[in-house]
Amino acid sequence: QSGEIVFLVGPNGAGKSTLMKLITGYITPSKGDISVNDMSVQGNRNFLANIGYVPENAPLYGDMTTYEYIHYSSQLHRVSKQEFEKTLPFVLQNLQLYDVLNQKTDTLSKGYRRRVAIAGALIHNPKILILDEPTEGLDPNQKHQLHSFIKEYSKDRLIIISTHLME
C-alpha cells in the first residue's frame, strides 16, 4: 500500500534480490505471474513508469558526472525539463549530493555512488521505490540520513527494501 515501507529480511542467498528482479521485470518467472498495481509484469513495461529500482550493485557510468547520470536517468523515464528542474534540488538536497554534482561517478566513494544511484531512481518521482541493500557502503551518519529520508519519502509511496541486517 502507499505509505508503507516493506522490508525483505533474510540471509544472503535467501532470494531477496531475485524477488526484486522479478517484481521489476528484470527476470521472468518460470511459473506463475507477478502483478504490480494490478498489471502483469510479463510482457508489459508500462508498470515501470511508476517504479524506481536500485539493484544491490547499482551500475553507474563512470565517465558521467553525478549531474549527467541523474539527467540521463530522467531522460530514460521521459521526465520533462520542467519536472527535472523541479525535482533535482529535492533529490540533491535529500541525498546530500550538491558537493559532488560535477564529479565523475567513478571517482566517488562507495557511499556517494550508492546515493547517486538512488537519485537516478528517484528523479522521475516513482510511486514505488525498490531498494536492494540501500545502506551498503554508507557510513553511520549517511545511513541515519538515508533512513530519515526514506521514512519521509514513504508518506505517499510504497517502498520495498531488502537487507540482511536486522537493525
Image: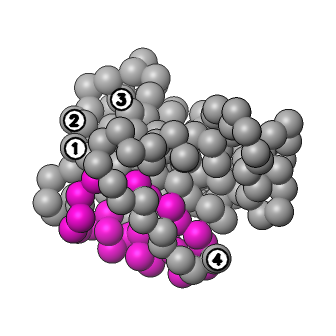
Secondary element under disc 1, as helix, strand or loop, is loop
Specify which label sits upstream in the sequence, 1 or 4.
4
Give amino acid for label 2: Ser
| Residue drawn 43% across the image and 34% down it | 58
Q: CA distance from mark 1 to mark 2?
A: 9 Å
- Picture mark count: 4
157 inside magenta stretch: yes
| Residue drawn 60% across the image and 72% down it | 157
Residue corresponding to mark 1: 137
Give amino acid for label 4: Gln
Q: CA distance from mark 2 to mark 3?
A: 9 Å
Q: Residues within 10 Å of mark 2 (few under 14, many from 20)?
A: few
Nearest-to-viewer mark from 1 and 3: 1
The one nearer the camera, 131 or 152, is 131
Residue corresponding to mark 3: 105
Is residue 49 visible in the rendered structure shown here?
Answer: no
Specify which label sits upstream in the sequence, 2 or 4.
4
Q: CA distance from mark 4 to mark 3?
A: 34 Å
Specify which label sits upstream in the sequence, 1 or 2.
2
Residue corresponding to mark 2: 109
The one nearer the camera, 21 or 134, is 21
Region in magenta: 144-167
Give the number of the disc on residue 1.
4
Q: Position of residue 3 (x, y in %)?
A: 57, 80
